[in-house]
Amino acid sequence: MKRINITVNGKAVSASVEPRMQLADFLRESLNLTGTHLGCEHGVCGACTLLVDGTPIRSCITLAVACEGARVTTVEGLDEDLIAGELRAAFSREHALQCGYCTPGMLISARDTVMRMPDANERDIRVAMSGNLCRCTGYVGIVRAIQSVITERKAKGLSSPPSPRAEFGPAGSGRARPTAVGAVAAAPAAARAARRPGPAGAADRAPEARRVAEPGVGKPQTTLHESFTVDYPRAKVWAFFGRLGDVATCLPGTSLLGTPTDEHVETRIRIKVGPIVSEFDGAADVVRDASSFSGVIRGSAHDARSRSATRGEIQYVLIEDENGAATRVEVDVGFTLTGPLAQFSRSSIVHDIAWRMTDAFARNLRARLNRGNGSARADSTAGASISEINAAPLILSVIWNRIKTFFRSLLGR
Amino acid sequence: MKPSAFDYERPADLDGLIALTRREDLFVKMLAGGQSLGPMLNLRLVQPDLLVDITAIPELKRVEETADAVILGACVTHADIEDGRVPDATGGALPRVACGIAYRAVRNRGTIGGSLVHADPAADWISCLAAIDAEAMILGPSGRRAIPIDEFMTGVFQVALEPGELVEAVRIPRLSLGARWGFHKISRKTGEMAQAIGAILHDPARDVLRAVIGATESVPIVFSGAAPLFSGSPGSGLAKAFDASAAVRALEDSGITDAVDRQLHLVALKRAIDQAARP
């Protein structure tokens, strides 16, 4: 717990808060100021917008503890405010609200628009208000209400108060006192282990019932195609692909949970991208067709920490190359991600991560094929196994160069 | 949608900050405005042991002008730049880009340093500052160094910072009076993350012609010498001389093969060039 001292609607407040408590929760839960609404809780909808040091901020992604010394004004604190009063009248007149859920945030942003943009036209208002979502009105009434207040103030020759901010930096941070550094205790070992289960944590885990791969649903969100050639006859490569555990652990960050069979494997896949660490536990089933040298691996997995889930399918086909001396492996990956990770990520980022994983998978597979066949062939590009995709910064151009080098080394050019 | 529990400290100075970030027994994450980290914490995609708030350190809010550059502390916000509270040496380029980032309530807390370190490919500063050839000024246990922005980001959410290092400030070169710039982003909705970004800087007096295709799947594509994007001399009129074939090749080399995606990026670049060419 941390002690904070802030001013809320003109009153000094001193309280103990958990560091993880967002400002909106502190106001609503501790001070019973429920005029501040929470919608999306990740900074998109604008319902929680309020004033800190006189400027609008998102209170769902601003920690209460980071507002030490700040002046907080919620919609409850704008009763006597001149511009807010004009806006309230205009909102009523223009039917700028229906259910009222977005209205506190709308009023805060509208007041800021009136103050900062005394010459705003309809388009300017729509852009300025684009961070506040309304599901009832279609925005027409809201824009008209703001427009009418701007027009009235202009007609009366009323000027806007000067900008309330003079210092630089995040609003609310200006008067924050430093905390005494050095008092940070190590996180309890148990808590750390629970939060970051590594291989050791996995061993402690109680044995669970056999995981079942869920069938894929509909068209996958993300699809990728990868093709690479290994200089071994197709029969050998086919035999290798039959060892499901060996194939699965070619996926970077993957470890086996239990002993795989020929048709079923259970794995943990650890993915680290910047500050995001996910551990997907899941299962996959394979169906192989020896007559066409092809197979389909269907899998699903769940990340207990972020409560995200993924399900997908890998199809592969082995094609004879160089008169049977080599084998081309064609891999098609398709998967769908659901839960917070999907909610946060945009498709391009997921695509990039999947691309890097597929690329690392192909290189690991090749390295393992070489090892498994007792090959003495030195291959610097495919020799090292990639255990985590962030092990090295994988820039696309770097990957392309590696692929080119890899093909050149394969073809002896 | 509440963050998992973490500890919180707000050091007073850079020494205190570096001491905390060197803790190897904890997962330490630095917090500036928290406008990208906040959603990740709420979604529990990031679960740190310790958040270190860097906004109480005066050096990180420092603003300095030199003969050839403006230096903005890492904790300067988008709104500080938008409102002209900090000096501008880019002929209005930075304030224009700043006012298009997310929404005003986000710009009042989101910082230039935080945006760079977060390294989201679709963010505005990483592309804009790569076009302007800015530098990240880095402080770490072994002293200070600077990295050009076009080398700073190494992948999605990944940057060229060593353990214990932080971005102290951003150095923005002073453009010549005759410099022309353009920045265009395509988003589904105002304030949303970009689907495509185009940026160009033409500063003949300093012999600079740079272009950026941003909001790709990974690092932005930077043409530090952008002459191949133009047939003939770009001086004769950037918009007329634009030749898309080199840009198409660069997009294909970066793995952008989807026709719609490629076209979005080309249009963003073309519009940035048109903007730079406008009198």
Image: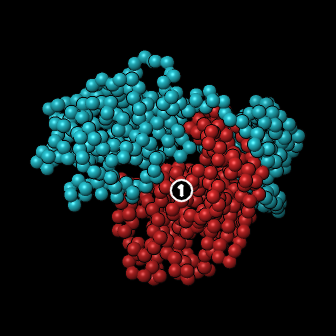
Chain colours: A cyan, B red
- Quarter location, residue A327: top left
State the residue in front, A94 or A333.
A333
Q: Secondary structure at mark 1?
A: loop
Residue in the picture at 31% in, 35% down: A247
Residue in the picture at 30% in, 30% down: A244
- Within 10 Å of disc 1 (Cα), the crowding (few <14, some 14-19, many 20+) is some
Q: Is residue A95 above or below residue B159?
A: above
Residue in the picture at 33% in, 43% down: A364
Q: Quadrant of the C terminus of chain A?
A: bottom left
- Quarter location, residue B166: bottom right
Could you say where residue A376 lies in the image, as x and y percent from the top left? Answer: 24, 46
Q: Is residue B94 above or below residue A215?
A: below
Q: Would residue B156 be visible to someone looking at this image?
A: yes
Chain letter of disc 1 in the image: B
Q: Is residue A215 above or below residue A356?
A: above
Q: Would residue A214 be visible to someone looking at this image?
A: no
Could you say where residue A172 lies in the image, as x and y percent from the top left? Answer: 77, 49
Could you say where residue A44 lies in the image, as x and y percent from the top left? Answer: 61, 43
State the residue in front, A358 or A379.
A379
Q: Quadrant of the N terminus of chain A?
A: top right
Residue in the picture at 45% in, 68% down: B223
Q: Which residue is mark 1?
A: B160
Q: Amino acid at mark 1?
A: Ala
Question: Residue extending furthest right?
Answer: A11
Q: Is residue A152 above or below residue A360?
A: below
Could you say where residue A186 lies in the image, as x and y percent from the top left? Answer: 68, 35
- For the image, the number of numbered tags is 1
The answer to whether A413 appears left or right of B271 in the picture is: left
